Amino acid sequence: MRQIKIGHMDNFAYLLADDFQRIGTVVDPGWPGDGVARLMQQAEEDGVDIKYIVLTHSHNDHTAGVTELVAKTGAEIVIHEEELPPAAKKGFDYDITVKGNDLLNLGGLELRIIHTPGHSPGSICLYSGGKLFTGDTLFVGGCGRADLSGSDPQQLYDSLFNKLLALPDETEVYPGHDYGDTPSSTIGAERQENRFLKTRSTEDFVSLRMAV
């Protein structure tokens, strides 16, 4: 697994691959040009053939590099079915749609889809081998905005507290942005230290999230 910082909004893209077939999956290729070039270079260095692109949601800073990366690799695009309406405006086709609890087999890599609406209707997190790729749902020390079109702070609370915090404390957290003190964390550390996850009710969470 490679965590690659791209673009001017501190985005993280991820290059995933199995150990044997070396079939590559890119999570959130957010920036064209240098961002895509860095992903392609890393794949070449690792001997990985990029075949899939998985989008945690459809916001531009997570999808702007898709068209260029598809042109260079022919990769298939994976997105949650509830993200299709806003994503349709991006001008590229989607090959695979998923829903919550789906198991996605990409080459030799298995990803479990966790539907985590709140930041956007079709936001997803990806769980594989003790690693959780959280997009804009959970950051190190923070969480996604809930004041955007399609956002819902109560849904975000449910996604965080009833889905992500149900995972084992040792689960490694890999966010969609480098907004924290470290580039990654664990569910246990976020449970103890993340101010949003220390709120004691839906109302307290919503009040804090909408105030900052």
Image (tube, grey):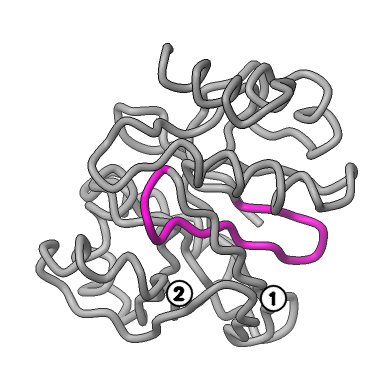
Identify the element where label 1 is drawn: loop
Task: Classify 115 as above or below 164.
Answer: below
Task: Classify 142 as above or below 173.
Answer: above
Pinpoint residue 17: horizontal percent, then vertical percent.
63, 71
Alpha-carbon neighbours of circle 1 within 10 Å: few (<14), some, or many (≥20)?
Answer: some
Pinpoint residue 209: horizontal percent, then vertical percent.
48, 22
Where are the magenta residues, as a range?
119-133
Alpha-carbon neighbours of circle 2 within 10 Å: few (<14), some, or many (≥20)?
Answer: many
CB-based contact (under 8 Å), mark 1 and mark 2: no
What is the distance, in whole Å, between disc 1 and disc 2 at their CAs? Answer: 11 Å
Q: Nearer the viewer, residue 178 or 89?
A: 89
Q: Nearer the viewer, residue 56 or 156?
A: 156
Identify the element where label 2 is drawn: strand
Task: Look at mark 2 in the image and give the residue it sits on.
Answer: 50
- The residue at the point 28 percent across, 66 percent down is 69
Q: Nearer the viewer, residue 157 or 201?
A: 201
What amino acid type should be assigned to the residue bearing mark 2?
Ile
Which of the 4 image quarters holds residue 48? bottom right
Viewport quadrant of the N terminus: bottom right
- The residue at the point 61 percent across, 62 percent down is 126
Nearest to N terminus: mark 1 or mark 2: 1
Number of disc labels: 2
Task: Look at mark 1 in the image and give the residue it sits on.
Answer: 18
Q: Is residue 126 magenta?
A: yes
